[in-house]
Image: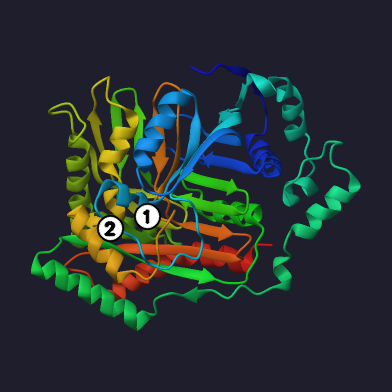
Amino acid sequence: MIQRTIRTFSVENTENFKQHLLSWSQQFETALWLDSNNYEQHYASFDAALAVEEFTAIKTDYLNAFDKLKEYQTITKDYIFGYISYDVKNDVERLSSHNFDGLGFADLYFFQPQKIIFIKGTTIEFHYLKMVNDEIESDFKTISNMSPRAQSRGYKTDESFDKASIERSRDTQPDIEEQKIKIKLRIHKDEYYSIVNTVIDHIKRGDIYEANFCQEFYAEDSTINPVEVYKHLNEISEPPFASFLKMEHQYALCASPERYLKKEGAKIISQPIKGTAKRLISAIDDEKIASDLYRDEKERAENIMIVDLVRNDLSKTAKKGSVNVEELCKVYSFKQVHQMISTVVSEIEENMHPVEVLRSTFPMGSMTGAPKVSAMKIIENLEETKRGLYSGTIGYFTPNNDFDFNVVIRSILYDEEKKYISYSVGGAITVKSSPEKEYEECLLKAKAMKYVLLNSK
C-alpha cells in the first residue's frame, strides 16, 4: 500500500477554508472537489475532500473499461479519484452510443493524486505523497491566508505569482457581464411530447416498465468562469453529493443530490432517487406538497420499480439473503426540491473485488429504467445527445478498497476549448406519465443550471 504523509490542522471557519481551497485548486491541471454541504445524510465519510495533481492516471474509452479500472485500482493500492461516464454501459452490455457529443469527455478517467485534503468538522487532514510532503505546511498557510480577490479569480497569493502572471490570469477569466449565453434546447416541447408518448407505447407493448428519458440544453461559442458558476450552483442547491471536476480544459460542475453506490467494508449502499416536487415559500404549503409527494401513487410506483431493479443488481454480488431495503420512498428536502429516496443495502464476500460491484450495477437504474438493458436500447434511439459524463458517476476509491460514487445529475459540463456548455435533465416515464407534467418536471430540474449560467459573474 502506498504510504502518505498525514498532517492535521484545526480551523475556526470551515466555510471560508472551503472557499479558499477550491480557488487554490485551480492552479493544477487536474482537480476533483467533493462536498457534502454538511447535509445530514447517512454514511458520510467526510464533509469535503480535494484531490489535485496527477501522480498516475488512467483515461480510456469504454472498451474493456472496467477491466482496465480493475487492474489500475489493484496495482495502485492508494486513493484514486475520477469518473465513469454513462457510455461505459457499452462495456457491460452489447450496446452502443452514436448520438451527437459536443463535449468529448473520455469514457472513464481516474487519477492518483499527489495531494489530498479532507475536511472533517473543524479538522483539516492533509494526505500527501512523500514526494510533496514538505509542501504541507506552506500549502496550509497559503490556503488559509488567501485574499478575497484571489478567491474570486482562482489563483493563490504566494510570491510565486509575479505581476505578469496575475495579469494573464485576469485576462483568461471571461467577463460574463459582457456576453450573453444563449441556451438552446436539443429537443423542443412538441417533439418531447411525441417521444414520451412513444415510450408509453413501448410500456403498453410490454417492452419495458419504465424508462428514464433525458434531453440536453446547451450553449455554443460561450465561456464561463467555472469556479464562480459552480459556487453559485452549489450555493443555491447545497446538495450532499456536489463535485467540481477540472481536467485541463474540461469541467464538470455537479450539484447532485443522489448517491449511486458506496462500499463500507463488506456493506454496499445504494440510494436511488425517483420522485420530485418543488419547494414552496409557505411552510404549511411546503409540508403539504412533501406529504403529497410521499403519497403520490405514480411517484411511488416509479421509485419502487427502481428499488426492485437495484435489489436485483446488488444480488449479483451479495451474500445470500443480505439484500435489504433500509428506507422505502422516504422524502428528503433540499433547497429547491423535495426528493423521494430509497436506501437499499447488501453485504458482499470479503474477497469480492470492489470494481466488480460497480460493474454489476452499472449504469445506475435510476437513470435507465426497467428492465435495464431494454430501457437503455430504447432511450439510446430516442435521445438526441450522447450522455457522456451526464448520468454517469464521480467518486473515489480508498486504499482499503472502499468507495463512494454519486450520480451525475443537476450538473453543468463545460469544454473551455470548444466553448461548449451542456446540461441535461431527465425523468422517469411510466404508463401513468403525462407528457405535459414530465416536461414541467424537466424544466424544474433545469431551473438552477439555467439560472446560474445567466446570472453568475
Which residue is under mark 2?
A: 293
User: For the view shown, which residue lies furthest in the front direction?
Assistant: 63
Q: Nearer the viewer, residue 309 or 106?
A: 106
Colouring style: rainbow
Question: Eyeballing the image, is 409 above or below 207?
Answer: above
Q: Residues within 10 Å of mark 2 (few under 14, many from 20)?
A: many
Residue 256 on image: x %, y % = 44, 50
Instruction: Tell me where residue 292 appears, x and y as whole percent.
Output: 27, 59
Q: Quadrant of residue 383?
A: bottom left
Q: Is residue 361 in view?
A: yes
Looking at the image, residue 40 lies above or below residue 232: above
For the C terminus, the quadrant is bottom right
Q: Secondary structure at mark 1?
A: strand
For label 1, the crowd category at 10 Å Cα-Cα, with few meaning under 14, some 14 to 19 and many 20 or more, is: many
Q: Between disc 2 and disc 1, whose residue precedes?
A: 2
Q: Of 144 and 206, which appears nearest the observer? A: 206
Residue at (38% x, 58% y) in the render: 286
Tell me, yes or no, if residue 363 can be seen here. Answer: no
Up the image or down, 251 lies above or below 426; here it is above
**Furthest-left residue in view?**
205
Numbered label attached to residue 338:
1
Q: Which residue is the extreme one toward the right?
A: 163
Residue 218: image tag: none
Q: Which residue sits at x=73%, y=72%?
A: 178
Task: Say which amino acid is labelled 1.
Answer: His
Taking the image as shown, residue 445 lies to the left or right of residue 326, namely right
Determine contact: label 2, label 1, CB under 8 Å: yes
| Element under disc 2 | helix
